[in-house]
Amino acid sequence: MADHKSSETALYAPVKRFLEAQGYEVKAEIGPADIVALRGDEAPLIVELKTGFSLSLVHQAIERQKITDQVYVAAPAGKGMRGRKALVKNRTLCRRLGLGLISVRLRDGHVFVHCDPAPYRPRQSAQKKKLLLAEFAKRAGDPNVGGATRVKLMTAYRQDALRCLSFLSKEGATKAAIVAKACNVELARRIMADNHYGWFARVATGIYDLTPEGTKALALYADDIKALASSRDL
């Protein structure tokens, strides 16, 4: 297997040819930079080469921004769906950092420029902000641990479902309108009808009761139900 340095040098010739076709004079290993290209009176252009897109490559490129704004990172082109997904994420990162991104198809030396260095101001989504603030406002307490993965998060929706679950466990089959009013859950009917967690069963028009899964959930979420009750939110 070729070592990393050999793979990095394989990127040099295609990138050099590409830049020379754009009118640059190109030289390798100038100071700390893998590639430096000059064209007329323009600011120097620097390209950092790596066998794969990595945090180390990004760190190097950020250091080169102390020399010039025209900094690119270059790595071999990825393959398949995994490569395409990685490219989307890497391009987004480079744009946010003001870096250019180049990939090289090693089998034929074709160079792809995915983005050029430029100041970046991310576009904020008003809808995503609205949803985030709504979830924050609706969620009772702070039932999750930040950074947790592969666990079922306690969302405001799940808390509303638990309110309905607790009410039905005490009152039995009940009209959805009564559940909604008693639990202060405006969407109680939809939550029970959609039944995402398998806890509810419609026993008559507009009337719901617990399923066996719902009964099991009472024990599984006993602490969460107790926390909702103690916050006077149930």
Image (cartoon, grey):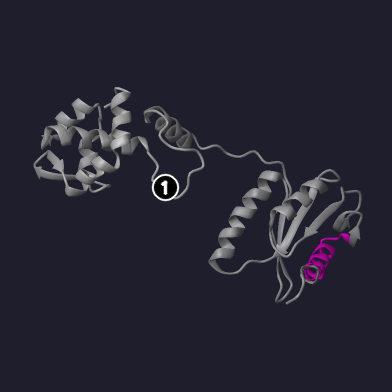
- The x, y position of residue 195, in whole percent, is 23, 46
Give me the residue at 40% from left, 34% from top.
Answer: 143
Q: Which residues are magenta?
A: 8-25
* Viewer-proximal residue among 159 and 16: 159
Please name the residue that numbered disc 1 is placed on.
151
- The x, y position of residue 130, in whole percent, is 44, 32
In the picture, the quarter occupied by the N terminus is bottom right
Amino acid tagged 1:
Val
- In the displayed structure image, the side of residue 195 where residue 51 appears, left or right: right
Q: Quadrant of residue 80?
A: bottom right
- In the displayed structure image, the side of residue 103 where residue 15 appears, left or right: right
Q: Inspect this view and state whether residue 59 appears.
A: yes
- The x, y position of residue 193, in whole percent, is 20, 43
Give me the residue at 83% from left, 65% from top.
Answer: 16
Instruction: Give the answer, above or below, for where 222 lies relative to 40.
Output: above
- The x, y position of residue 58, in whole percent, is 73, 51
* Viewer-proximal residue among 213 and 115: 213
In the picture, the quarter occupied by the C terminus is top left
